[in-house]
């Protein structure tokens, strides 16, 4: 035998020497679910280890993540049903606790990076990402609502906007609205290839945001398609996106790899609620080792080409990360 690949696996030092992919906590984004009020930590049944947090509790969470090297957070609001309506007006109201929380986080932790969610569903009485009329999701009626929401978040001091709605043309529309109002430094991380996935279930439990009727298949992508992801990426890139995101992550590693090969801006991947909940559930039953499976999962997403990984396990990964 001339080639013996095992020679390069002989010791921990050698394995580390030839390791191709590394994942540092700096590459990770921790999602936070925010709720109005004080001293609240509402557990989410289908997302073990994750809770809805009031701003004061989120301070603690952000602080402990920063100590571990997780510097970036993606924020989602859990809105009372009484404040939801057809046009999602609470999303840009000056009373919105989520906007106030963004401003407070930026004041207390200016060094952290905050990513928002731009979509109607947390605020919509219909539970859809766009405006609903007669059972249809109206694309062009939704765009100005998203722009109002995005501008309010930019004013609050968000670093990166995260349009997760999948309406056509929204990246360009938001970019223009931002630039017009002087927010040329606010970046856009576009949910570029967001699939109509059943893995979002626990997230919708967390925000009570499931569609009241129908599904999201007329705007989120068909899981069977990959060339369409390239089309979405071309559009988002040409409309001014700063990051292209693939979501979910592990069942779409091929899409991550394709976007990485074709585009030069950073590629983000969202390891979504259902993907995280599966690991937690199996571990609870004693069937899998949560920490090891989490590390292997996140590493695989990075290996496929993700520069940035959003995961509910970000803090857990960082806790066990050895420098
Ligand atoms: C909605 C949104 C969803 C997620 C992020 N933003 C759910 C959906 O599209 O229904 C899912 C994230 C997750 O499952 O962790 N705009």
Image (cartoon, rainbow, N blue to C red):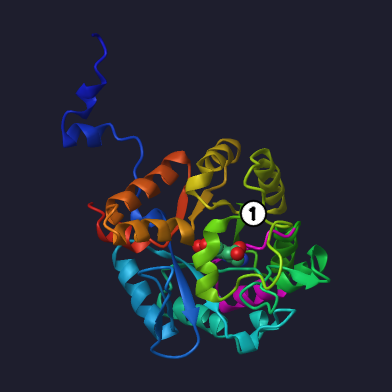
* Left or right placement of residue 271 versus residue 151 in this view: left
- Percent x, y of residue 253: 50, 42
- Percent x, y of residue 110: 43, 73
Label 1 sits on residue: 241
| Residue 185 shows in this picture | no
State which image quarter holds ligand 1.
bottom right
* Mark 1, secondary structure of its residue: loop
Count the marks. Answer: 1
* Left or right placement of residue 254 versus residue 57 in this view: right
Q: 49 or 212: nearer the eye?
A: 212
- The magenta segment is 148-167
Does ligand 1 reach within 8 Å of label 1's beta carbon?
no
* Left or right placement of residue 305 versus residue 286 in this view: right
Mark 1 surroundings: few (<14), some (14-19) or many (≥20) residues within 10 A: many
- Percent x, y of residue 167: 73, 60
- Percent x, y of residue 90: 66, 84
Q: Is residue 7 above or below residue 256?
A: above
* Left or right placement of residue 93 versus residue 176 in this view: left
Q: 32 or 216: nearer the eye?
A: 216
| Residue at 66% from the left image edge and 46% from the top image edge | 233
Residue sitting at the far right: 134
| Residue at 68% from the left image edge and 77% from the top image edge | 124
| Residue at 60% from the left image edge and 73% from the top image edge | 209
Which quadrant of the structure image shows residue 79?
bottom right
Q: Is residue 303 above or below residue 111?
A: above
| Residue at 67% from the left image edge and 56% from the top image edge | 220
Image quadrant in which the N terminus is located: top left
């Amino acid at each position: 035998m001339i080639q013996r690949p095992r020679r390069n696996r002989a010791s921990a030092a050698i394995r580390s020497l030839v390791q191709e992919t590394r994942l540092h906590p700096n590459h990770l984004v921790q999602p936070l679910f925010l709720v109005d009020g004080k001293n609240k930590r509402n557990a989410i049944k289908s997302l073990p280890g994750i809770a809805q947090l009031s701003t004061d509790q989120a301070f603690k969470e952000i602080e402990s993540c920063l100590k571990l090297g997780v510097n970036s957070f993606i924020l989602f609001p859990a809105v009372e049903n009484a404040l939801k309506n057809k046009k999602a007006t609470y999303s840009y109201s000056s009373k919105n606790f989520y906007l106030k929380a963004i401003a407070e986080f930026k004041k207390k932790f200016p060094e952290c990076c905050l990513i928002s969610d731009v979509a109607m569903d947390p605020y919509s009485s219909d539970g859809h990402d766009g405006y609903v009329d007669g059972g249809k999701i109206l694309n062009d009626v939704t765009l100005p609502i998203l722009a109002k929401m995005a501008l309010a978040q930019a004013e609050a001091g968000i670093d990166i906007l995260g349009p997760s709605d999948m309406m056509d043309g929204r990246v360009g529309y938001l970019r223009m609205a931002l630039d017009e109002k002087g927010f040329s430094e606010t970046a856009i991380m576009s949910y570029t290839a967001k699939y109509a996935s059943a893995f979002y279930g626990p997230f919708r439990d967390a925000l009570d945001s499931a569609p009241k009727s129908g599904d999201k298949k007329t705007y989120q992508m068909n899981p069977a398609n990959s060339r369409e992801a390239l089309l979405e990426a071309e559009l988002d890139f040409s409309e001014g996106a700063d990051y292209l995101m693939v979501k979910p992550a592990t069942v779409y590693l091929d899409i991550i790899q394709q976007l990485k090969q074709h585009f030069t801006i950073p590629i983000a991947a969202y390891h979504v609620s259902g993907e995280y909940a599966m690991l937690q559930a199996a571990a609870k039953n004693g069937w899998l080792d949560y920490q090891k499976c989490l590390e292997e999962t996140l590493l695989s997403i990075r290996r496929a080409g993700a520069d940035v990984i959003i995961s509910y396990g970000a803090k857990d990964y960082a806790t066990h990360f050895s420098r």
